[in-house]
Image (spheres, grey):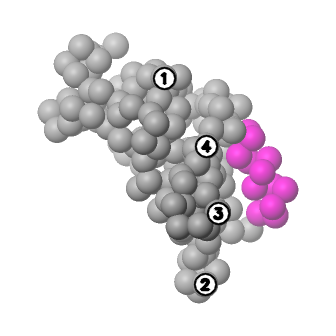
């Protein structure tokens, strides 16, 4: 993450863009994870990547996770999710529907989630959050395009 390194924000940004430029032509999913207080420098860095990868045109390809909520009430989790969405200027209501096709209810995939994975929790206690995370990361909204990455979009700004 941006806070786990001795590198400057600019160096981290450059390394990520260079790696993406060399290794990919499309991105299916961008996963942004936050926890605790979202510092201004972190929100600026995240917004820079959102702009670079055209968040406004590819909202269904961006998953925002507010993590480490083990000690939070449901209300606090919702407040943290709203705060993260406000700080990062995301659409908190972004979701897509996956038809079940087998007579069961369609699945709603939310692209803004508040999750807790307590280190001491049993699998049964985290199973719902794990399923929600897996669905959001690995199921692609077929009605939306992949994020194209090309040399023009990778120019360091």
Residues at marks 3 and 2, CA–CA distance in whole angstroms:
22 Å
| Image quadrant where residue 28 sits | top left
**Residue 118 falls in image quadrant:** bottom right
**Of tags 2 and 1, which is closer to the observer?**
1
Label 4 sits on a secondary structure element that is strand
Q: Report the residue at 35% width, 26% height from top.
A: 10
Q: In the image, which residues are magenta?
A: 72-83
At x 64%, y 27%, the residue is 89
- Image coordinates of residue 76 in percent, x first then y, are 81, 55
The mark closer to the camera, 3 or 1, is: 3
Up the image or down, 81 lies above or below 10; here it is below
Q: CA distance from mark 1 to mark 4?
A: 14 Å
In this rendering, the answer to whether 63 lies above or below 57 is below
Q: Which residue is mark 2?
A: 124
Residue 153 visible in this rendered orientation of the protein: yes
Mark positioned earlier in the residue sequence (3 or 1): 1
**Residue in view at x 78 percent, y 51 percent:** 78
| Label 1: which secondary element | helix
Q: Which mark is residue 105?
A: 3
| Cα distance between the residues tagged 2 and 1 | 37 Å
């Amino acid at each position: 993450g941006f806070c786990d390194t001795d590198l400057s924000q600019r160096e981290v940004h450059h390394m990520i863009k260079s790696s993406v430029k060399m290794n990919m032509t499309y991105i299916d999913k961008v996963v942004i994870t936050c926890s605790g207080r979202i510092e201004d420098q972190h929100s600026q860095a995240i917004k820079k990547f959102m702009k670079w990868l055209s968040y406004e045109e590819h909202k269904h390809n961006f998953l925002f996770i507010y993590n480490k909520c083990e000690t939070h009430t449901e209300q606090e989790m919702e407040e943290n999710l709203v705060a993260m969405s406000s700080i990062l200027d995301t659409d908190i209501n972004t979701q897509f529907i996956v038809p079940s096709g087998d007579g069961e209810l369609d699945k709603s995939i939310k692209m803004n989630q508040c999750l807790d994975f307590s280190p001491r929790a049993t699998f049964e206690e985290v199973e719902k959050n794990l399923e929600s995370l897996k669905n959001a990361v690995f199921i692609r909204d077929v009605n939306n395009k992949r994020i194209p990455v090309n040399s023009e979009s990778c120019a360091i700004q």
